[in-house]
Structures are given as structure tokens and as C-alpha cells.
Amino acid sequence: SQQGEEDPQALSIQEGENATMNCSYKTSINNLQWYRQNSGRGLVHLILIRSNEREKHSGRLRVTLDTSKKSSSLLITASRAADTASYFCATDGGSGAGSYQLTFGKGTKLSVIP
Amino acid sequence: DAGVIQSPRHEVTEMGQEVTLRCKPISGHNSLFWYRQTMMRGLELLIYFNNNVPIDDSGMPEDRFSAKMPNAAFSTLKIQPSEPRDSAVYFCASSLGEGVQPQHFGDGTRLSIL
């Protein structure tokens, strides 16, 4: 089954810097989603980008999607200590799998140092 | 607006005991998902309900696991008998509409089987 894989596994930056996380996947998709998980909490949906979109913004978040390379990136600008969390990409099944199913990567653990 | 509510937040029990995890989805959401999260395997889909009907239970690891959704406001995941390898964080998530939509997660149940 296809699966998003995030890179790097862990990232540590200073407050105010930008953070970039990447996601690669294996087969065609209809859309890709990014989620955040704070320690001890559930996942929170951040942004959804469709396969016919190349870039999407939401506040300090910018997501890009390159379907030819089967990759996506999540950029967090002007990071804050509160952005410390794990970030996951999730891909749908494309044309093959169940239309409801998301497959999650293992995540990037971001630490923002005040 | 209340999010997805899971109980208990933590459960510690001895091997062989029955464990019941509970979930109240967001009102009006018609899709419900149970996931298991471990360090080794990441986030795995166990079962998916749509309009209270189990659609895909292929992720349920063994017959020891069972899930029910008697009405739109309540779902349970039961493990009987429990084993140490079932130790994980179990999440419930709900979403609205058909196809792949943003999912709203509860804060999970951290299960430890001794």
C-alpha cells in the first residue's frame, strides 16, 4: 500500500526561523493532507491540497505538491515555540484503494527552541 | 463546539482482561475511524464506519478485536483477551461527507497491557 514518508525524521530550529518538511509517496493520489500532533494529543488537520493544485497557503503555512515527483513540502514561516509538534502527511488511495482511506507517514518531529 | 471525545484517556490492565475503549464523534459527522499508533508502525487504520455501518475492518489485527457503532453518537473498540503487544495509543476520528475529507481526531486512549 502507498505511504507518505516524511523527511527529515526530526528537525530542530530557533524561534523565528522557517521550518521545511518533506513528504514522498509512492502511487497516484487525489489529495494529500498535512496534520500536526502535539505531545499526548490527537492529530489536528492543517491543510488539504488536491492533485491538481501546486501550492496552497494557510496563515504561516505553505504547502506545495509536485505530482510528477510524488512529493509535497510543508513550510512553516516565522516559527514559534508553540509550533513544536510532530507533523504528518497523509495520502488518499488514488484510483485504487478505498475512497475514504488515508495512509499516514511516520512524521517529522519539529522542535522550535525559544 | 465539542470535538471527538474518547474515554478513558489512560488504561492500564493485566494481560487477559477485556478492554473497552469509547468514542463520541462530532455531531453530524457520518464517518468514524479507529486507529492505533505505535512507535514501530506509526498510525494504522483499524476499522472504518460510514453511517454507523462497518465498511472496512481489514485493519483489525485479530479476532480479539471488535468494534461497534450502535448509533451515530457512540462507538466502542473492544479487545478480549488483551495481550501486552496491544499496548499502544488508540485514536478515534470522525469526518463529514463522502470521499477523503479532513479527519477530526480525539486525544486518544493510551493503553498499557501488563
Image (cartoon, rainbow, N blue to C red):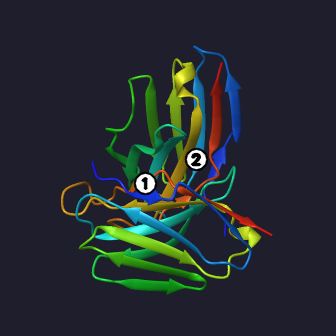
Residue B93 in view: yes
Taking depth in this image into account, of A45 and A81 the one nearest to the observer is A81
Q: Residue B7, image x and y in percent?
A: 67, 42
Coordinates of residue B1 in the picture (x, y in percent): 67, 70
Classify B92 as above or below A81. Answer: above
Residue B28 in view of the camera: no
Vertical side of A47 occupied by B75: above or below = above
Using a 10 Å C-alpha cutoff, classify the residue at mark 2 as few (fewer than 14 neighbours), some (14 to 19) or many (20 or more): many
Image point (23%, 54%), residue name: A97
Q: Please report, as a chain letter, where disc 2 is located.
A: B
Q: Which residue is mark 2?
A: B23
Query: At numbered mark 1, what does the secondary structure look like: helix, strand or loop?
Result: strand
Horizontal relation, residue B15 to residue B8: left or right = left
x, y (%) of residue A104? Answer: 43, 54
Amino acid on which disc 2 is placed: Cys
- Can you identify the residue that label 1 sits on? A104
Circles 1 and 2 on the same subunit:
no
Residue at image coords 38%, 57%:
A4
Q: Which mark is residue B16?
A: none
Q: Is residue B102 left or right of residue A41?
A: left
Mark 1 to mark 2: distance in Å?
21 Å
Residue type pointed to by label 1: Phe
Secondary element at image label 2: strand
Q: Position of residue A45 (x, y in %)?
A: 53, 67
- Is label 1 or label 2 in front? 1
B2 vs A41, nearest the viewer:
A41
Dot 1, how many residues are within 10 Å of its Cα: few (below 14), some (14-19), or many (20+)?
A: many
User: Which chain is mark 1 on?
Assistant: A
| In the depicted structure, whether residue B102 falls above or below residue B65 | below
